[in-house]
Image (spheres, rainbow, N blue to C red):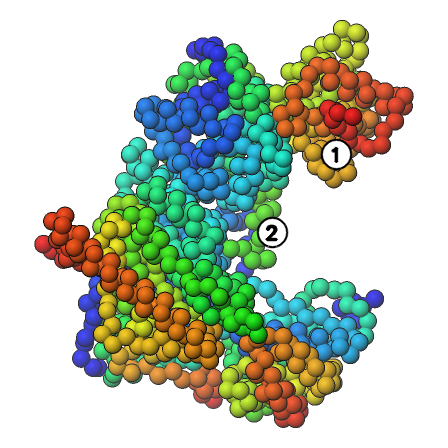
């Protein structure tokens, strides 16, 4: 056998899995998620990074309809689904109950609360519920698996769908070339709620995602992590490429991975030295590649990407200056929670 | 009035995988029959099936109005659009069949292998390598149009022109499919020519 | 496929009072390509495990074991992401046909 | 049984019951005429008189979602709303009962828009009649107070959520005499809070459970049939709890309340605050020697079919007063329920239906008398009618 080069982060996660779930992931196999779906890795990376019992709520969507098919469940952790728009409100209710019952001494365990929603249940129909739940300050982590459209209903547009993309409700016709409007930047909007922790991540960079989850759990109050989830079915690439696209999205700066503390201090975690052109990312997606015939659309997309990127860098610089003014150690703010443990 | 036992009604059951156009093919078959003034019906078995999962579709074609909305449980014709499911859901595929049930299979296996896997010794069996045709014509393993050609030839339920008309209309209507129309019409014709009785 | 329970046999509120019972489902039946592991090349880095959508790769802290084909849907992510090319996707039917002989 | 009589509005009485029960979680969104109730309760929370975590949500849909989450977690949960708020909640009402969660909802009855009206009718509650929530109607502040205390026990024994209705403004904002039980009696009656009150608490992390799975055609029917069978057991549970409540309060509540029906030939049926006025109308007619009576529906869901069928066995004519219209060419919701309930009676009475009190239109004794007269003349064939249903108060 070849020499052992077990990656530490993964070994630790594997260890936690052994201990917590006697060798099952938080999400058991046998679920009905599509071949090559990126959602289960996101769920497992997130839940494995939390080292206490977790109660999960989920919005209606791919994750929900494929993991809780009566009378079977794929969940190895307490789980509740109410409806499409209520993932945040529901976990808020659970957390409120927990606070009271714990105070009354009716519960001993230390429990964490996580909500999962797709972009439909997070950017759109569930946005009111999410915005209000974080404003109320419930102690929970909301994770959006953003596949840029309503995939569970057969791919209609959502406000996370980028310009020019084909969906069932934004077809490519003689008058209109796919979706006309740019995608909504929900991560920015959540940061504007000035909650303790907001981050954007990619499941391919599991180190970054799991670190962010661990970091998030060091804060009390609402936390939000937005992960891109390339959808093999609707983006129409072949199943084995899911993580490849999750990687490419970061390499092209289409999906910057960054984190925001208290809506004040920004840090871009990965800065591709030589970013790949957006064309490469677009060309990998049959749902989108028709726009390559329209340079003006590609330009518009590239511009959106560059503008966002520069904006982020500016915010990062600004927060360094701010931290200095306030006499706060900027780097310490974003220190890896593991390091904190040791020190 | 037709009933399940009414011989004027042909009862067909499709077995395939999500994402390979099995449901679309079943609907096109029914539509083509309707174009020819017959009565047609195609009913997918709705569920939470994702791409890759085995799918089952019922199709009925009749000279009389079709009243029943029940799925086909005693098929006269069984169409298998993806050979790999013969291994995995064999029991579901052969449920309710009898010695008169006709099988139409998309595969590159030799006939005796298919008979062995399905355990059908004397049933009428038609074979077409529709996946090969699809890959050659438009580079995707979406064998449904080639299978439709094979069905037209082997069952005579509908004629090729009706299918061509139906496919053209369906593809013209979709911005995504328009570009693939010609290749699919070719696949249809090749399926018609290349299917053989084993 | 499974025995269907009667109305009085199921818990109230259509609640499922158990964990991971989806493991009854043989999602391996969806598989058209099979990841074949080359143990010579495998370094047990576990990357395949973290990216596997179907928890089909049994691992412990040190080692990756043979894929669990009862669940593996054959997506091929493991083969693409393996830094050591230790996995090759082989058409399931070729293997099934061999088994037949 | 130590009690004291004080002057309270319906909302104050309800807030007092909420304080005494000491719910774990109250997820609420303000809407007239419920707003005041939540204001009173918020004071108790602010002053630490209760342990309740009051979640001030951003809308009624989320209010019920939070209640579902909290109840599934294992907490004792309440919310309150009215009119449009109930309408906004409806999707989640079905989910709460489908999950068999013992949630209590106060519906301070208000009309539905349009035109917008903040005043009372039963249109909002009628949205919930098929949702498999147990539904209790209160005639006054006293009954609202008593129903609330009983509702907690009913919900937890039946494992179905309960709606306690009382009329907006007419009851919610009017001062009346209310007899209040002492805190200890109430708390002993409802029992302590504990996540194991329910069979599958989410917060029991040692036994993870899945709430809200997706049922395919192969199971949905079984899930619903179980719910159907269990909902029929609610009759006995309500009776049982009413008896237990009589032991601490001296007051027994039946599914229906009959007034002078023993020898009555003509009977009027209503729900909520109008019943008192209807009783006065009966008194007035009785004083003229007319054989009339009145019935109040207290348990609206499940509907008291048997009790009503028996109570109407010897009536010649029955007029049902609906505080909501169904716009269906048949009659109001209550009218259809009553008609179905007596369908198998040997000698079925003549049935008529009046819609009244919409959007807060006040109802008085004379109008009820006019309605009972109309019933008698219709029954005797002196008058005729175009439809089974008529509006009692529309200006002609």
Q: Nearer the viewer, residue D212 or B168?
A: B168
Mark 2, mark 1: which one is toward the viewer? 1
Q: Which residue carries the number 2 mark?
A: D221
The C terminus of chain A, quarter of image: bottom left
Mark 2: which secondary structure? helix
Q: Residue at x 22, y 74 (%)?
A: A273
Q: Nearer the viewer, residue A264 or A297?
A: A297
Q: Which residue carries the number 1 mark?
A: D331
Q: Is residue D173 above or below residue A183?
A: above
Q: Residue at x 39, y 61 (%)?
A: A145
- Callouts 2 and 1 close, C-beta under 8 Å: no
**Circle 1: is it few (<14), some (14-19), or many (20+) Cα within 10 Å?**
many
Q: Is residue D51 above or below residue B97?
A: above
**Circle 2: is it few (<14), some (14-19), or many (20+) Cα within 10 Å?**
few
Q: x and y percent of residue D240 in the render? A: 54, 26
- Tell me which chain the residue with mark 2 is part of: D
Q: x and y percent of residue A188 in the render? A: 33, 56
Q: Using the numbered discs, state the Cα–Cα distance from disc 2 to disc 1 in whole angstroms.
A: 30 Å
Residue D297 in sight: no
Please determine if labels 2 and 1 lie on a single subunit. yes
- Count of marks, rendered view: 2
The mark nearer the N terminus, 2 or 1, is: 2
- Tell me which chain the residue with mark 1 is part of: D
Q: Looking at this rendering, what residue extends furthest in the right direction?
A: D382
Q: Residue at x 54, y 41 (%)?
A: D88
């Amino acid at each position: 056998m070849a020499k052992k080069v077990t990656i530490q982060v993964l070994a630790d996660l594997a260890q936690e899995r052994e201990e917590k779930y006697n060798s099952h992931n938080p999400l058991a196999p046998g679920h009905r998620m599509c071949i090559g779906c990126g959602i289960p890795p996101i769920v497992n990376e997130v839940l494995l990074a939390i080292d206490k019992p977790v109660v999960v709520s989920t919005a209606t969507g791919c994750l929900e309809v494929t993991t809780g098919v009566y009378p079977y469940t794929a969940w190895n952790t307490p789980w509740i689904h109410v409806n499409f728009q209520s993932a945040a409100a529901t976990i808020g209710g659970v957390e409120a109950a927990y606070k009271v019952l714990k105070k009354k001494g009716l519960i001993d365990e230390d429990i964490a609360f996580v909500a999962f929603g797709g972009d439909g249940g997070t950017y759109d129909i569930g946005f009111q519920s999410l915005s209000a739940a974080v404003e109320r300050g419930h102690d929970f982590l909301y994770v959006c698996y953003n596949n840029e459209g309503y995939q569970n209903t057969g791919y209609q547009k959502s406000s996370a769908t980028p310009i020019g993309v084909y969906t069932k409700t934004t077809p490519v016709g003689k008058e209109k070339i796919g979706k006309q409007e740019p995608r909504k930047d929900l991560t920015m909007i959540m940061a504007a709620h000035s909650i303790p922790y907001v981050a954007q991540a990619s499941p391919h960079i599991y180190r970054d995602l799991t670190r962010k989850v661990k970091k998030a759990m060091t804060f009390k109050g609402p936390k939000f992590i937005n992960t891109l989830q390339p959808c093999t079915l609707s983006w129409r690439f072949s199943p084995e490429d899911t993580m490849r696209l999750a990687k490419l999205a970061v390499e092209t700066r289409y999906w910057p991975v960054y984190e925001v503390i208290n809506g004040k201090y920004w840090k871009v975690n990965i800065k591709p030295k030589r970013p790949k052109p957006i064309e490469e990312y677009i060309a990998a997606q049959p749902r989108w590649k028709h726009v390559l015939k329209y340079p003006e659309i590609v330009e518009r997309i590239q511009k959106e990407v560059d503008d966002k990127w520069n904006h982020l860098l500016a915010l990062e610089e600004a927060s360094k200056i701010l931290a200095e003014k306030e006499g706060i150690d900027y780097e310490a703010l974003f220190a890896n929670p593991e390091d904190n443990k040791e020190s | 009035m037709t009933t399940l036992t009414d011989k004027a009604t042909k009862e067909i059951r499709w077995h395939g995988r999500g994402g390979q156009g099995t449901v679309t093919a079943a609907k096109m078959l029914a539509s083509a029959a309707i174009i020819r003034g017959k009565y047609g019906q195609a009913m997918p078995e709705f569920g939470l099936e994702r791409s890759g999962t085995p799918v089952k579709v019922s199709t009925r074609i009749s000279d009389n109005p079709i009243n029943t909305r029940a799925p086909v449980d005693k098929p006269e014709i069984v169409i298998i659009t993806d050979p790999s499911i013969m291994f995995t859901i064999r029991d579901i595929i052969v449920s309710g069949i009898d010695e008169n049930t006709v099988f139409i299979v998309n595969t590159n296996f030799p006939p005796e292998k298919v008979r062995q896997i399905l355990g059908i010794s004397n049933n009428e069996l038609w074979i077409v390598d529709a996946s090969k045709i699809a890959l050659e014509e438009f580079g995707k393993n979406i064998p449904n149009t080639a299978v439709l050609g094979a069905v037209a030839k082997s069952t005579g339920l509908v004629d090729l022109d009706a299918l061509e008309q139906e496919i053209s209309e369906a593809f013209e209507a979709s911005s995504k499919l328009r570009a693939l129309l010609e290749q699919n019409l070719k696949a249809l014709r090749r399926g018609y020519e290349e299917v053989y009785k084993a | 496929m499974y025995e269907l329970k009667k109305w009085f046999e199921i818990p109230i509120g259509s609640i499922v009072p158990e964990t991971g019972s989806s493991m009854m489902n043989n999602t391996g039946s969806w598989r058209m390509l099979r990841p074949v592991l080359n143990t010579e090349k495998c370094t047990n880095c576990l990357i395949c495990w973290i990216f596997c959508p179907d928890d089909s790769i049994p691992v412990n802290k040190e080692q990756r074991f043979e894929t669990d084909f009862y669940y593996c849907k054959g997506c091929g992510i493991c083969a693409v992401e393996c830094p050591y090319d230790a996995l090759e996707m082989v058409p399931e039917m070729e293997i099934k046909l061999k088994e037949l002989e | 049984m130590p009690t004291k009589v004080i002057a309270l509005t319906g909302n104050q009485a309800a807030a007092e019951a909420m304080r005494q029960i000491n719910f774990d979680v109250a997820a609420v969104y303000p809407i007239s005429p419920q707003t005041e109730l939540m204001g009173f309760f918020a004071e108790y929370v602010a002053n630490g008189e209760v342990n309740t975590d009051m979640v001030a949500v951003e809308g009624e849909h989320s209010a019920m979602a939070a209640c579902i989450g909290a109840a599934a977690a294992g907490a004792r949960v309440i919310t309150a709303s009215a009119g449009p708020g109930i309408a906004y909640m409806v999707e989640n009402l079905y989910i709460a009962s489908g999950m068999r969660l013992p949630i209590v909802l106060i519906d301070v009855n208000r009309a539905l828009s349009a035109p917008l009206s903040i005043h009372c009718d039963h249109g909002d509650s009628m949205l919930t009649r098929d949702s498999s929530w147990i539904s209790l109607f209160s005639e006054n502040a006293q009954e609202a107070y008593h129903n609330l205390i009983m509702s907690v026990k009913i919900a937890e024994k039946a494992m179905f959520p309960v709606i306690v209705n009382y009329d907006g403004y007419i009851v919610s904002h009017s001062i009346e005499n209310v007899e209040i039980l002492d805190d200890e009696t109430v708390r002993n009656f409802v029992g302590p809070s504990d996540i194991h009150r329910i069979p599958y608490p989410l917060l029991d992390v040692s036994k993870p459970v899945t709430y809200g799975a997706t049922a395919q055609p192969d199971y949905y029917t079984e899930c619903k049939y179980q719910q159907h069978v269990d909902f029929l057991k609610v009759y006995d549970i309500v009776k049982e709890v009413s008896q237990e409540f009589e032991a601490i309060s001296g007051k027994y509540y039946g599914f229906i309340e009959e007034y002078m029906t023993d020898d009555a030939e003509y009977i009027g049926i209503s729900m909520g605050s109008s019943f008192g006025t209807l009783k006065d109308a009966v008194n007035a007619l009785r004083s003229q020697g007319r054989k009339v009576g009145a019935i109040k529906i207290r348990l609206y869901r499940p509907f008291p079919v048997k009790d009503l069928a028996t109570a109407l066995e010897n009536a010649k004519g029955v007029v049902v007063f609906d505080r909501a219209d169904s716009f269906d060419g048949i009659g109001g919701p209550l009218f259809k329920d009553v008609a179905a309930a007596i369908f198998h009676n040997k000698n079925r009475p003549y049935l008529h239906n009046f819609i009244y009190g919409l959007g807060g239109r006040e109802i008085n004794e004379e109008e009820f008398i006019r309605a009972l007269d109309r019933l008698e003349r219709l029954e005797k064939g002196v008058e005729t009618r175009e439809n089974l249903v008529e509006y009692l108060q529309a200006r002609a």
